[in-house]
Amino acid sequence: MTMTTTPSNIPQRTVSLLGLGPMGAPMAANLVRRLGELTVWNRTPERAAGIVALGARQAASPAEAARDVVLTVLPDLPQVQSLLPGADGLLAGWRANGVEQPILVVHGTVSPVAVRAFADDLWKEHRIRLVDAPMSGGVPGAERGDLSLMVGGDRPTVESLAPVFTTVARTVVYMGACGSGQLAKACNQVVVAGTIAALCEALCLAERYGLPRADLLTALTGGLAGSEALNQKGDRWLHGDFAGGGSARNQLKDLVFAREAEEAAGAPSELTELLLGQFTRMVAGGDGDLDHSGLIKTIAKTPTGRPS
């Protein structure tokens, strides 16, 4: 199911976004511009200044940000779970605000198995509906509001979120029950990591033979090897600037989730194992905070292109 809507269809439902990192901040900017109202919270309050300047309301705690729909853009599930308990947590906030059956959306990439169990517990214990909606498209996609969302959860609940989701994404696909979005994202991350690794190895090969990197990138972009990964990362490879962006550490985490899913299903995992080895070496080498396109530095250090 692919969702579409227009601003006139937006229901009278309050929305908050928690987590104003590289992806969360531009998503929040698009939400406040298009919805006209948004509450935001970030563990480091100073990061909310730009979004508040656009008209968002800044909450001092997760409890103050407890709205009908709470979007979380955080690295992993433990960070989401930490928002719930205590006097300053979401649970207390929802009770104080009289929000019945709130919707908690997990936009980060997390374990499909863990998020499914978490969703079951939230519904049984607190009547909270959880939707997993991991995203693809990188920071540029978040800035343009044309991310791709892979969504899992109760179908009516997911459909009710269409006006919110289509504010930040161009493609919104319902994948099935809770956890299905994360499974789709695991598939996505194998493709992304594989594409990044292939391009890095190709660039190293070209360099050994003296081919101009800029010319090769132009040729690849115009042919079958062209991809969104190449479009977004080409300048990084051209200029050797790997600061910021999607970190290698997060890429490694996502590949661990992909292998977990593959092992549970008895699915092929040969490429995932290779990619895990490469990104493990990159992180162990001290480059975990670099953009994942910086894998070229790790690959270039191995003369044969094979793990040592």
Image (cartoon, rainbow, N blue to C red):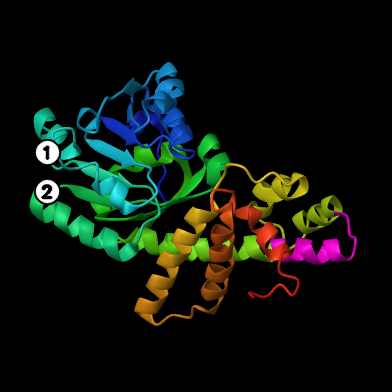
Instruction: Identify which amino acid the numbered label 1 is placed on.
Output: Glu
Q: Which residues are magenta?
A: 200-212
Q: Is residue 205 visible?
A: yes
Q: Residues within 10 Å of mark 2 (few under 14, many from 20)?
A: some
Identity of the residue drawn at 43% across and 37% down? 24
Q: Secondary structure at mark 1?
A: loop
Residue 247 % position (x, y): 53, 50
Tell me residue 144's x, y (percent). Answer: 55, 36
Q: Residue at x 19, y 32 (%)?
A: 63
* Residue at left offset 32%, top offset 40%: 71
User: For the image shown, how many numbered marks are present on the structure?
Assistant: 2
C-beta proximity under 8 Å, tags 2 and 1: yes
Q: Quadrant of the N terminus?
A: bottom left
Instruction: Please say whether residue 25 is one of the residues in the magenta stretch.
Output: no
Q: Which residue is labeled 1 in the image?
A: 100
| Residue 274 to residue 200: above or below | below
Q: Is residue 203 magenta?
A: yes
- Circle 2 is placed at which residue position? 127
The label shown at residue 45 is none
Q: Along the horizontal axis of the image, is 232 left or right of 207?
A: left
